[in-house]
Image (tube, rainbow, N blue to C red):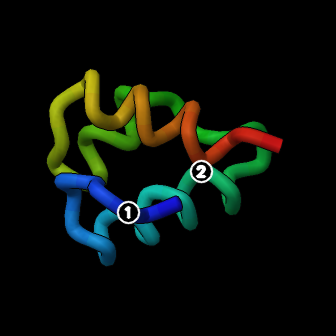
Amino acid sequence: MFHSRKLAFTDLLAGILLVVNGAKGLSAVHLSRNLDLQFKTAFVLAHWSARP
């Protein structure tokens, strides 16, 4: 699951934590601002971590 990702493992976990702990999730814009990422990266991370 975390294999061959360019983003640091701690950043991945922080992003997943932010998305999961949000009452209705977290927008990619807020995620990109909180983790200092590009919007595209935050968008992919938000949709990747929200999978069932």
**Going by the picture, which residue comes out furthest to the bottom?**
10
Residue 20 occupies quadrant: bottom right
Q: What distance separates the C-alpha of mark 1 from that of mark 2? A: 20 Å
Residue carrying label 2: 19
Q: Earlier in the sequence, mark 1 or mark 2?
A: 1
Residue 38 occupies quadrant: top left
Element carrying mark 1? loop
Q: Amino acid at mark 2?
A: Val
Q: Residues within 10 Å of mark 1 (few under 14, many from 20)?
A: few
The residue located at (43%, 64%) in the rendering is: 2
Q: Is residue 17 left or right of residue 23?
A: left
The residue located at (57%, 31%) in the rendering is: 47
| Label ID, residue 3 | 1
| Looking at the image, residue 24 lies above or below residue 36 | above
User: Which residue is more in the foreground, 18 or 48?
Assistant: 48
| Looking at the image, residue 18 lies above or below residue 8 | above
| Label ID, residue 32 | none
The residue located at (42%, 30%) in the rendering is: 44
| Looking at the image, residue 23 lies above or below residue 48 | below
The residue located at (44%, 57%) in the rendering is: 15
Residue 27 at x, y percent in the picture? 51, 30
Disc 1 to disc 2: CB gap under 8 Å: no
| Looking at the image, residue 14 lies above or below residue 38 | below
Q: Amino acid at mark 1?
A: His
Where is the C terminus found, in terms of image quarters? Answer: top right
Element carrying mark 2? helix
Residue 11 at x, y percent in the picture? 30, 66
**Going by the picture, which residue comes out furthest to the right?**
52
Q: Is residue 38 left or right of residue 49?
A: left
User: Which residue is more in the foreground, 13 or 26?
Assistant: 13
